Image (spheres, coloured by chain):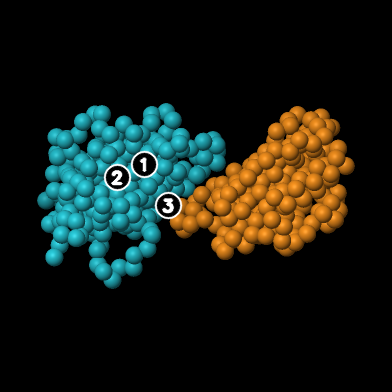
Chain colours: A cyan, B orange
Amino acid sequence: MSRRYDSRTTIFSPEGRLYQVEYAMEAIGNAGTAIGILSNDGVVLVGEKKVTSKLLQTSTSTEKMYKIDDHVSCAVAGIMSDANILINTARVQAQRYTYAYQEPMPVEQLVQSLCDTKQGYTQFGGLRPFGVSFLFGGWDKNYGFQLYMSDPSGNYGGWKAAAIGANNQAAQSMLKQDYKDDITREEAVQLALKVLSKTMDSTSLTSDKLELAEVFLSAGKVKYQVLSPESLSKLLVSIGLTQPAAEVT
Amino acid sequence: IFEYNGSALVAMVGKNCFAIASDRRLGVQLQTIATDFQRIYKIHEKIFIGLSGLATDAQTLYQRLVFRHKLYQLREERNMKPETFASLVSAILYEKRFGPYFCQPVIAGLGDDNKPFICTMDSIGAKELAKDFVVAGTASESLYGACEAMFKPDMEAEELFETISQALLSSVDRDCLSGWGGHVYVVTPTEVTERILKGRMD
């Protein structure tokens, strides 16, 4: 199956495909799902945590949600070490822009510059592509709230709702059915959690398997908030996706 | 070059609080071109930095510090301690040892246990930690005298505000390059109060 064309990232196959990039996308298909939904007053990002051992030291840092700048944050799916490098790059790019222009970097420009970095690894240098897909959620004064999805090839697109990681096809088609254009942030949270619960492998949703982050405006400033496990549990109970703790005998 | 724009900065330590004050004049040698120039910047809720000296260097230095501090905050997921921030400023200034920023910063902050911290440094980063007050700017000699006379240890926020304001206003009156009012920030563990002073508008 044209195995000769696999090992170099910088070579096209005879059918015009870049195998390394496609294999990178395969790697992401094994990672925890992340879903992003754009609403009229914010962006909601939900991620499924794959590592849920009790031995894992719980700290305040998150596994899937990261803040890039005050007005942009992202959800990650794929190889975490690759993601860390890219997140750091994105943070520095955002700060450099702010230093030069004294205003926050527009979201699309940030996504574009990060994707340019990713694309570089598919064309020259002989290094493998990054095995990460991102969902960027942010706000800027030109276009308001935006959601972007980017993949290892360096492609990106603006979306109203998107899913990356395991079962993303199923999640994407569910989102297509249920998404409405004038969805509010609360409805978006509920929709994201419902879709995630259907695509996740495990039978029930508990707050330690998920991370939920929202980007919204509060008093004129953009706020990025990761929900604490307690609020997430309460939310799951109110939507009816988990049994309340008291009922379990 | 330090006397091109004119400035006066002072920071004082009180009981679990600190105050930092500056004048508001921006001049080009003898001509005043602004009377609302901001010299004191907030880095985060508990750290303030005042930058005296050449205004353009003060602004650029502040922008560089914002850059470095924001990355620190994103990576370490916490705010910088004042001592760490002072070391950062000192390092950034020393990087330009042979072509320096013509600024003298005054840094004031509350540490983790809400202990007040103040320091100043020269334009190439030599830190001067003090327990009571620090001064900078064209009016610094008058400020030294005024603070030395008026300062008492362990003042509460209100009294500290009065003291620092009096010290600032009386010193800038003796200096032709600084003045046009004052800008005072008093920071306690629970709140930050910002006040504008009306002095001799000359």
Q: Label 1 is found on which chain of the structure?
A: A
Q: Position of residue A181 (x, y in %)?
A: 24, 29
Amino acid bearing label 1: Val
The answer to whether one can see residue A172 in this image is yes
Question: Of the residues shown, which amino acid type is indicated by label 2?
Answer: Leu
Tell me what residue is drawn at x 44 percent, y 30 percent. A141
Identify the disc placed on residue A45.
Answer: 2
Nearer to us in this view, B161 or A204: B161
Q: Residue at position x 21%, y 57% from top?
A: A206
Residue A215's tag is: 1
Same chain for mark 2 and mark 3? The answer is yes
Q: Along the polypeptide, which appears first: circle 2 or circle 1?
A: 2
What kind of element bears circle 2? strand
How far apart are labels 2 and 3 at the CA level? 19 Å
Q: Depth-wise, is mark 2 or mark 3 nearer the camera?
A: 2
Residue B53 makes an appearance in the image? no
Q: Is residue A116 left or right of residue A189?
A: right
| Residue at x-position 38% and y-position 59% | A60
Element type where label 1 sits in the image: strand
N-terminal label among 2 and 3: 2
Task: Specify which label sits upstream in the sequence, 1 or 3.
Answer: 3
Q: Which residue is mark 3?
A: A88
- Chain bearing tag 3 is A
Hey, which quadrant is residue A248 in on the image?
A: bottom left
Q: Position of residue B135 (x, y in %)?
A: 77, 52
Circle 3: is it few (<14), some (14-19), or many (20+) Cα within 10 Å? some
Q: Foreground: B193 or A169?
A: B193
Marks 2,1: beta carbons within 8 A: yes
